[in-house]
Image (spheres, rainbow, N blue to C red):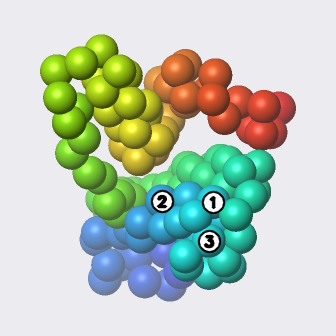
C-alpha cells in the first residue's frame, strides 16, 4: 500500500507518516481493552506492537524507494514519566513505565532493538 501511494503521490507529497500513535492500537486496544479491538491479551498486544513497528520499517523503505526526496516518519504519543517519590521502588516503576510507553517504540526505530528490561517482561510474547 505504501509503495502504491508513494508511487502515485510522491511527486507532490514530501512528508509522510507511516503510522499514527501505534501505542493506541497495540497497548490500549489489545492490552487495556479500552480502544478497538477491545482485548486484554498481553501476547496480542506485544505481537501487534512488533508487527506495527515492522510495518513502519517496510513502509519507510517503500516510500523512500518510490519518493527518495521525501521525509518519512512515524507519529508517537510519547509521555514523560517521573517517579512519584525518590524511593527506589518508584524509580523502578517509572523506568518500567517509560519502557512500556516510550522506549518500547523509540529504541527499535533508532536501531537499538527492543529495550532489554522490557524484553524481560514481554519477550515471551515476541515473535522469534
SS class of the residue under badge 3? loop
Q: Picture coordinates of residue 26 (x, y %)?
A: 59, 61
Q: Is residue 12 left or right of residue 63?
A: left
**Pointer 2: what residue?**
23
In this picture, is 75 found above or below 119? Answer: below
In the current view of this chain or complex, which residue is farthest to the right? Answer: 128
Q: Nearer the viewer, residue 83 or 114?
A: 83
Asked if residue 72 lies left or right of residue 29, the reply is left
Which residue occupies 28% across, 71% down? 14
- Quadrant (top left/top right/bottom left/bottom right) for the C terminus: top right
Within 10 Å of disc 1 (Cα), the crowding (few <14, some 14-19, many 20+) is many
Circles 1 and 3: CB distance less than 8 Å? Answer: yes
| Secondary-structure class at tag 2 | helix
Could you classify mark 2 by the number of other residues whose Cα lies within 10 Å: few (under 14), some (14-19), or many (20 or more)?
many
Judge from the rendering whether residue 81 lies leftward or rightward of residue 97; answer left or right.
left
Measured along the vertical axis of the image, is residue 92 above or below residue 58? above
Can you see residue 69?
Answer: no
Q: Nearer the viewer, residue 33 or 87?
A: 87
Q: Position of residue 19 (x, y in %)?
A: 47, 67
Q: Is residue 116 above or below residue 37?
A: above
> Which residue lies under the disc numbered 1?
31
Residue located 16% across and 21% down the image: 86
Which residue is disc 3 drawn over?
33
Amino acid at each position: 500500500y505504501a509503495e502504491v501511494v508513494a508511487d502515485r503521490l510522491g511527486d507532490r507529497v514530501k512528508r509522510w507518516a507511516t503510522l499514527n500513535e501505534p501505542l493506541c492500537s497495540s497497548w490500549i486496544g489489545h492490552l487495556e481493552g479500552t480502544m478497538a479491538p477491545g482485548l486484554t491479551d498481553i501476547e496480542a498486544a506485544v505481537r501487534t506492537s512488533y508487527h506495527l513497528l515492522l510495518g513502519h520499517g517496510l513502509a519507510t523503505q517503500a516510500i523512500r524507494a518510490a519518493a527518495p526526496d521525501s521525509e518519512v516518519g512515524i507519529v508517537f504519543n510519547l509521555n514523560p514519566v517521573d517517579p512519584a517519590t525518590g524511593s527506589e521502588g518508584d524509580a523502578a516503576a517509572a523506568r518500567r513505565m517509560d519502557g512500556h510507553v516510550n522506549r518500547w517504540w523509540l529504541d527499535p526505530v533508532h536501531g537499538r532493538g527492543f529495550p532489554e528490561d522490557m524484553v524481560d517482561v514481554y519477550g515471551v510474547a515476541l515473535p522469534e
